[in-house]
Amino acid sequence: GGEELSYDQALNLVELRTTLENALDEYNEVNAVMNLVLFDDAVLHVARIVRIVKQTGGHAMLVGVGGSGKQSLSRLAAHVCGFTVMQIMVSQTYSLLDF
C-alpha cells in the first residue's frame, strides 16, 4: 500500500547491537533457537537486509561461503520486520507446479 517508510540513522553501534540481541531473544522464544554472535559486521549486515526488504518490492541475493550466517541473519532481519520466512525445498521432483 501507500505505507511511508521512515528511516533513522543508527548513531551508536552498541545500541543497535542491543536492539538486535533483544530481537534475537524474541525470535528464539517462538522459533528454533539460533545461537548467533552479533559482531560488528553481522549487526551491519542485518541492518542492510532490514533496510532492503522493508522497501516495496525489496529483495536481495546474499552471496558468501556456506556457514557464514546468510540464512540466520536473514531470518533475524525478517523477524525484525515482522515478516514470515518461507523456504523452498528443491528436490529432483520439484516442478513449477510446486512453486
Image: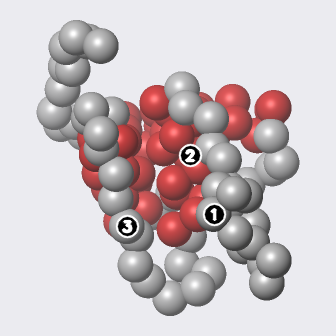
Mark 3 or mark 1: name the one nearer the start of the chain: 3
**The quarter of the displayed image where residue 6 is located:** top left
Nearer to us: label 3 or label 1: 1
* Few, some or many residues within 10 Å of mark 3 (<14, 14–19, 20+): few
**The quarter of the displayed image where residue 39 is located:** bottom left
The residue that label 2 is drawn on is 76
Nearer to us: label 2 or label 1: 1
Amino acid type for the residue under numbered disc 3: Met
SS at mark 3 in the image: loop
Q: Position of residue 16 (x, y in %)?
A: 37, 38
- Residue at figure coordinates x 22%, y 11% from the top left: 2
Pick the front one: 31 or 58 = 58
Q: Looking at the figure, which quarter contains the C terminus?
A: bottom right
Q: Specify whether residue 14 is in view.
A: no
Pick the front one: 42 or 71 = 71
Single out the residue that lies furthest toward the front: 97
Which labelled disc corresponds to residue 96?
1
Q: What distance separates the C-alpha of mark 2 from that of mark 1?
A: 29 Å
Left or right of 61, for residue 83:
right
Left or right of 66, for residue 46:
left
Q: Position of residue 59 (x, y in %)?
A: 34, 51
Mark 2 or mark 1: name the one nearer the start of the chain: 2
Q: Is residue 39 above or below residue 78?
A: below
The residue that label 3 is drawn on is 61
Mark 3 or mark 2: name the one nearer the start of the chain: 3
Q: Are marks 2 and 1 in contact (CB under 8 Å)?
A: no
Amino acid type for the residue under numbered disc 1: Leu
* Few, some or many residues within 10 Å of mark 1 (<14, 14–19, 20+): few
- Residue at figure coordinates x 56%, y 46% from the top left: 76
Q: What distance separates the C-alpha of mark 3 from that of mark 2?
A: 16 Å
